[in-house]
Amino acid sequence: MRTSIAVVVVLAAASACKSSEPAKPPPSSGTGAAAGTAAAAGTAAAGDGTRSATTEATGALRPVSECPPALRGADEGLARTIPAGCTTVVEGDYHVEGQLIVEAGATLRFQPGAGLFVGYATPSRLEVRGTKDQPVRFTSAGDATPGAWVGVHLHRQASRSRVAGLILEHADVGLDVEASDLTVEGSTFRALRGGAVRLADDVVLAGFTGNTIDAAGEVAMSLAPAAMPGLGAGNTWPADAVIELRAGTAARSATWVAQGAPLMVSGEVYVQGKPGKATVTVAPGTTLRFGGDGALYVGYDGDGELVAAGSEAAPVTFTSSGDASPGAWSHGVVAYPHGTVRVEHARFEHGGDAGHGALRGEGGTLAVSSTTFADNVVGLSADANTELRALEHAQLTGNRDAALALTPRHLAALAADNAYGAGQVITVEGGRVTQVVTWPRQVGARVVVGGEVYVDGGGALTLPAGARYDFTDQGALYVGYDGAGTLRVEGTAAEPVTLVGPRDEAGAWPGVELYGHAVASVLRHLVVEDAAGGGVRVSGGGAVEIDGLTCARCQDAALRWDCPSKVTQRGVKAEAGTPTAALAPDGC
């Protein structure tokens, strides 16, 4: 007995899994017409060797055009046409190994448990030729209830089938598809139990446009990334409908058209070309809901780009398909070494996990504009190998652990116009600054430096007026340690730059030190608190000009330097808990 592979659909919105009924193979003999009609119509006997509808010699199929009282069993080697206005009953499983054309205005009524199966053994084709005024109807011959009959199954050899102007109702699943290059247009799917359309993992969809889906079950449509380019415009979905996007690879460049129903991402979706580059553009107004295993991985082991191209009126939304709480989807949207993610007018919510953002760079490239990060564990994160081209015009609020988790060089990519809600934190791990950068002031956010920051290798770091940086006990700022480095502090009397430790006590963090390769550094109106060994230390021949330095709760002097160093200083003050202001070296 031959068996086909059932299409398994994982419903991420439900706790249990539901699979389609196994598609049944055709019987070994028999004709599709009711007893006595096939011979009279001149049909070929089953297995007579005629070639199928999609072979080179399509004319070798035996043509049949009639309105049979019933269809059952198998049509093999036939080019059967159901004429306009015909109404016939499908008794049990009806298998097509050849071609079936259903003209406008025809009706197929399916008995309970019956179904239509096309292209199991040989290349075959289904063509439904309904129109808006004269639709074709596939309906129940029994109770008018969802699941009364099986539905239509297109096996792998039913490629290039076409369905237009069809009303399909009261089935379990409308179209259960293993065949590629299916076109569905201007059709209506209603009163279905298990979904309008299910597409197997590797199916390429030629087109799905202008269709109406009404009451089609918990998941209205289920498909893998390969079929997404064919999901077109003009489709209408129920208010509570979801389209399941299963695990797989989007290997072709395409635009994912907004459907008016959310995409429920139930598995790991990879955006990458093999070979070449795949660019997926997510259209304005698209909502992607992620299940616990849902993710978008861009450029993991092939070149890929994801462009979330929303608009102010119709943003692209990345959210949870389950709980509306931080971390409900944890795998994230990730730019890997071969990947770029560009986001404009988007929203990320309820994602991330410890140290990792809902949007994250893991060796790839990120560019973000006019985007909201709300109620995530971490909004956006970038590791040391990620290029963060920009984060501008962003809104960050309610992110539990951090709005942003970055390295020192990524702070330079933050625009000054980002807006932060109450309690938002930017965490900065240790690392090197080897380029000429400014850390723009992030008004409303607390910037926490959790590691040793080295400015060297030709790097220059500027800290703007009014900026404040909180250092953990592992955080420090070292300049010119291994190659030339420059620190410029551009505070003013009204808006000093402030560096503080994790606790209001002397020695809570290491402080600032300029080494022998520190050159052309200028510190103006700098406030240091809670430092060990002095607020600012200069050693090994470092050069710095200081105009206004205040140290509170510092273990040693506010400023101290050694003989080889070149220090010009004025306005150095020691406040409460600091033993002295400037401590010059002896014996120079």
Image (cartoon, rainbow, N blue to C red):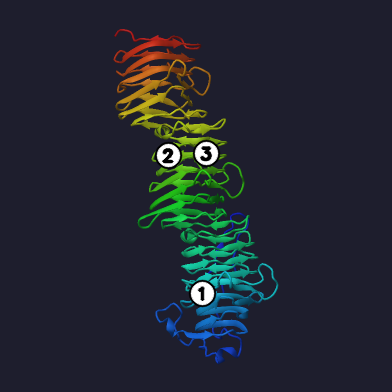
- Give how far across and how far down residue 210 sits, in percent: 54, 62
The three-letter code of the residue at mark 1 reads Glu
Estimate how packed mark 3 is, as few (under 14), some (14 to 19) or many (20 or more) residues with alpha carbons within 10 Å. many
Q: Pick out the residue farthest to the bottom.
A: 40
**113 relative to 272, above or below:** below
The three-letter code of the residue at mark 3 reads Val
- Give how far across and how far down residue 154 sits, in percent: 52, 72
Camera-side residue of 183 and 322: 183
Q: Earlier in the sequence, mark 3 or mark 2?
A: 3
**131 relative to 564, above or below:** below
Estimate how packed mark 1 is, as few (under 14), some (14 to 19) or many (20 or more) residues with alpha carbons within 10 Å. some
Mark 2 highlights which residue? 383
Badge number at residue 378: 3
Q: Is residue 327 left or right of residue 230?
A: right
Mark 1 or mark 2, whichever is nearer to me = 1
Quadrant hosting residue 484: top left
The three-letter code of the residue at mark 2 reads Asp
Residue drawn 31% across the image and 19% down it: 542
Mark count: 3
Position of the N terminus by quadrant: bottom right
Q: Secondary structure at mark 1?
A: strand
Residue 1: tell me if it is visible. Answer: no
Q: Are marks 3 and 1 in contact (CB under 8 Å)?
A: no
Badge number at residue 180: none
Camera-side residue of 342 and 234: 234
Position of the C terminus by quadrant: top left
Label 3, label 2: how many angstroms apart (C-alpha)?
Answer: 13 Å
Label 1, label 2: how many angstroms apart (C-alpha)?
Answer: 52 Å
Label 3, label 1: how many angstroms apart (C-alpha)?
Answer: 50 Å
